[in-house]
Image (cartoon, rainbow, N blue to C red):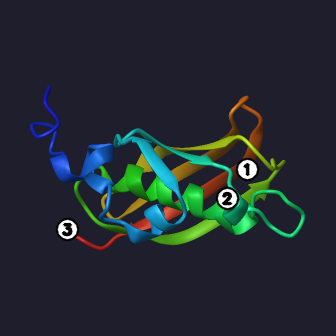
Amino acid sequence: MSEEKMGLKPEFSDPESYRGRVPFVEYNHMEITKVSPDESEIRLRVNPDARNLMGQVHGGLICSLADTVTGITARADGRKYVTESATVHFLSNVSEGTVIARGVMIRRGRKTVLTRGIVEDENGRLLADVTISMFCITA
């Protein structure tokens, strides 16, 4: 079944459609690699701008990766969402390589969604586990 028949708008279902439209993503060197209402993905090559004073990926950037990728997953249904709450569990960190964030849909309700952000290094080591609820601001 095509994405349009499933109710998905092409502008929210293709990683390329985000390129140049979300300055925050571009500014933070995030690369959207997969968009789906069930699971989306962002990759980030660790660079000096991403590191904290200890030389590791800044916790705020890890949170931003999780928030961004879960927002993309929520928004893949063609509606607009804002973050309502987030619980972050930092488990590890890296100072180089690629960080991969996946947004997984847990439950999609009429007005709210519950998502999980999984942030890992390129070897699959879990860096953060994040639960985010989002509120739909469009019908």
User: What is the distance, in whole Å, between disc 2 and disc 1 at their CAs?
Assistant: 7 Å
| Mark closer to the observer (1, 3) | 1
Would residue 66 be found to the left or right of residue 24 on screen?
right
Identify which residue is drawn at 26% across, 45% down.
13
Would residue 10 be found to the left or right of residue 29 on screen?
left
User: What is the distance, in whole Å, between disc 1 and disc 3 at their CAs?
Assistant: 32 Å
Amino acid under disc 2:
Ile
Amino acid under disc 1:
Ala
Q: In this rendering, is residue 48 above or below 124?
A: below
Identify which residue is drawn at 20% across, 52% down.
11
Residue position marked by numbered label 3 in the rendering? 139
**Which label belongs to residue 128?**
1
Residue position marked by numbered label 2 in the rendering? 62
Number of labels in the image equals 3
Q: Position of residue 95 (x, y in %)?
A: 81, 50
| Mark closer to the observer (2, 1) | 2
| Mark closer to the observer (3, 2) | 2
Q: Does the rendering let one see residue 87?
A: no
Question: Is disc 2 in contact with disc 1, using a CB cutoff of under 8 Å?
Answer: yes
